[in-house]
């Protein structure tokens, strides 16, 4: 089986839960960039950030800043060329689907 592309997933609230929102964001940007470099230089394959989010318990403003920053980071890496193929948020909920919401 031939590798077509690589995926990574991030669970920031579990992995660095004791850190501030700002520290989590710095960690996330470094983490994405290091995987992007590996996909470009070692795997030579596209990379997709396939699952990420931030708990709604962290506060709406904090979550919005985090999500915007991650999307900006992914976009900037994609603009540089190479391997960043895109990103996918963990889940989006429409009104009336609150019973399915896990907080992310």
Image (cartoon, grey):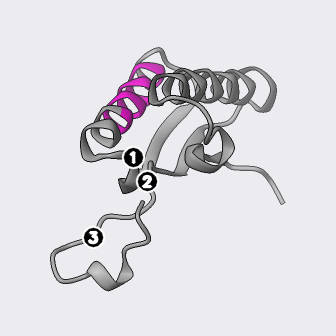
Disc 1 to disc 3, how far (Cα)?
Answer: 18 Å
Q: Is residue 69 above or below residue 49?
A: above
Residue 58 x %, y %: 39, 46
Question: Which residues are the magenta region?
Answer: 66-78
Disc 3 to disc 2, how far (Cα)?
Answer: 14 Å
- Compared across the picture, whether 50 is left or right of 101 comes to right
Determine whether the residue tagged by mark 1 lies in a helix, strand or loop: helix
Whichever of callouts 1 and 3 sits on the residue coming sooner in the sequence is 1
Q: Is residue 29 above or below residue 66?
A: above
Residue 102 x %, y %: 44, 71
Residue bearing the label numbered 1:
58
Q: Is residue 70 visible?
A: yes
Disc 2 to disc 1, how far (Cα)?
Answer: 6 Å
Residue 47 x %, y %: 60, 39
| Of labels 3 and 2, the one closer to you | 2
The residue lying at 64 percent from left, 28 percent from top is 31
């Amino acid at each position: 089986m031939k590798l077509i592309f690589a995926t990574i997933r991030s669970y920031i609230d579990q992995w660095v839960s004791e850190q501030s929102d700002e520290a989590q964001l710095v960690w996330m940007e470094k983490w994405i960039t290091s995987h992007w470099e590996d996909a470009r230089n070692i795997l030579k394959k596209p990379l997709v950030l396939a699952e990420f989010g931030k708990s709604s318990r962290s506060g709406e403003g904090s979550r919005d800043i985090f999500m915007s920053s991650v999307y900006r980071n992914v976009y900037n890496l994609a603009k540089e060329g190479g391997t960043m193929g895109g990103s996918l948020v963990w889940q989006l909920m429409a009104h009336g689907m609150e019973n399915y919401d896990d907080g992310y």
